Image (tube, coloured by chain):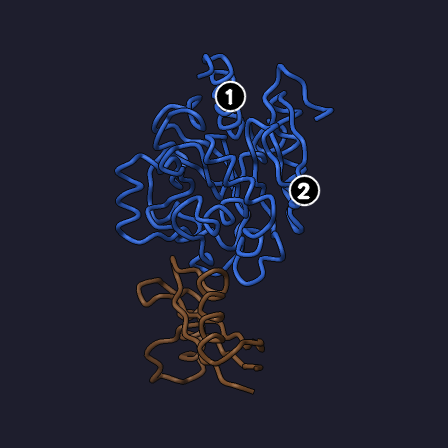
């Protein structure tokens, strides 16, 4: 079966995000005075073959642990859906 | 093997696609230090002919995903892990430090500089630990002038890891002022604790963001980088002199 996966990788809440802070000050200078916080992360889309939904989720989770996210500084979330 | 002679320390300089400081490291070892160096392509799997392995700076694999994240899976990195396990000396400089952290050979991670700028400038490093194999030629508290050149040198480790590094004496260098004061202003990238270089628990793997190979000629910015290379050569010699078990 073929699956689509969407992976979000974000810095852990405790980790300072200089990019997010810079984007926030840019937004404020554009007049978006109400912005309280910005965090910048990564969004990846994958297509993969797997036996079933559970197997696809396991594979993508494994990919995140081994490569897509760095567990020292990042967290990730995964959504998998059949094509 | 052909270029390596028996009476010199043998340095292996790793070359990944996108490595750019390999030539400088090679020249620092051969011309400034007077020891032997050979390039090692990232597909090689045996490092046993070397006394010290150098992971130079650059942008291995374009820094795609995260600096060092892809290089970590190169065949040669398996060999680096084995080499380190057997007690071999490993030094990762700049991108090499990033690769060692991504590989788990060193704790922590190198993040984007806190001001988001690429910084290419002189920095002053206070030597926190003067000990073999990397800083035996220095004195504790001595200041070394060694330049940085990076956009992702912001060292991060959680509180527990930092406390452990501190307690074990694994922090070798901190960014400081020219007279050795560790201040926020002397920190060029936001690194926690002004950390510029650390070793693993065993003490045989060093990662540092500044470039000692670019501070080995009086003509171009000073020779403080030689303190580190000479310490390594001393350590190799004393190991060679020690009786084998």
Instruction: Determine whether the residue tagged by mark 1 lies in a helix, strand or loop.
Output: helix
Instruction: Determine whether the residue tagged by mark 2 lies in a helix, strand or loop.
Output: strand
Which residue occupies 38% across, 67% down?
A75
Residue B116 locus on image (x, y percent): 48, 61
Task: Identify the subunit bearing mark 2.
Answer: B
Residue occupied by mark 2: B41
- State which quadrant residue B130 falls in: top left
> Chain B hue?
blue
Residue A8 locus on image (x, y percent): 45, 74
Marks 1/2 in contact by CB < 8 Å: the verdict is no
Which residue occupies 65% across, 24% down?
B36
Indicate whether B68 appears above or below A20: above
> Chain A hue?
brown
Could you tell whether B64 is left or right of A32 in the image? right
Q: Residues within 10 Å of mark 2 (few under 14, many from 20)?
A: some
In this rendering, the count of numbered labels is 2
Lower position in the chain sequence, tag 1 or tag 2: 2
Which residue occupies 64% across, 47% down?
B16
Mark 1 and mark 2, same subunit? Answer: yes
Task: Identify the subunit bearing mark 1.
Answer: B
Residue occupied by mark 1: B236
């Amino acid at each position: 079966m073929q699956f689509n996966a969407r992976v979000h990788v974000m810095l852990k809440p405790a980790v300072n995000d200089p990019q997010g802070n810079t984007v926030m000050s840019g937004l404020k200078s554009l007049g978006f005075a109400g912005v309280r916080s910005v965090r910048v992360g990564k969004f990846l889309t994958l297509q993969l073959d797997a036996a079933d939904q559970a197997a696809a989720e396991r594979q993508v989770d494994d990919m995140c642990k081994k490569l897509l996210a760095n567990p020292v500084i990042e967290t990730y979330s995964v959504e998998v859906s059949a094509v | 093997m052909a270029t390596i002679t028996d009476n010199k320390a043998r340095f292996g300089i790793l070359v990944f696609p996108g490595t750019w400081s390999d030539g400088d490291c090679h020249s620092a070892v051969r011309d400034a230090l007077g020891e032997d160096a050979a390039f090692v392509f990232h597909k090689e799997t045996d490092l046993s002919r070397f006394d010290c392995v150098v992971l130079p700076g650059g942008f291995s694999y374009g820094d795609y995903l995260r600096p060092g994240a892809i290089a970590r899976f190169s065949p040669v990195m398996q060999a680096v892990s084995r080499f380190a396990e057997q007690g071999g000396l490993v030094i990762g400089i700049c991108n090499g430090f990033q690769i060692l952290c991504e590989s788990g050979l060193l704790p922590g991670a190198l993040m984007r500089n806190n001001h988001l700028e690429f910084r290419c400038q002189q920095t002053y490093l206070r030597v926190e630990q003067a000990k073999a194999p990397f800083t035996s030629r220095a004195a504790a508290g001595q200041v070394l002038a060694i330049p940085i050149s990076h956009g992702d040198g912001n060292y991060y480790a959680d509180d527990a890891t930092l406390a452990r590094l501190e307690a074990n004496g694994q922090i070798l260098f901190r960014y400081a002022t020219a007279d050795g004061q560790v201040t926020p202003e002397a920190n060029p990238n936001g690194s926690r604790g002004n950390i510029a270089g650390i070793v693993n628990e065993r003490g045989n793997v060093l990662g540092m963001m500044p470039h000692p190979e670019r501070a080995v000629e009086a003509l171009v910015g000073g020779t403080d980088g030689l303190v580190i290379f000479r310490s390594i050569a001393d350590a190799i010699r004393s190991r060679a002199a020690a009786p084998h078990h």
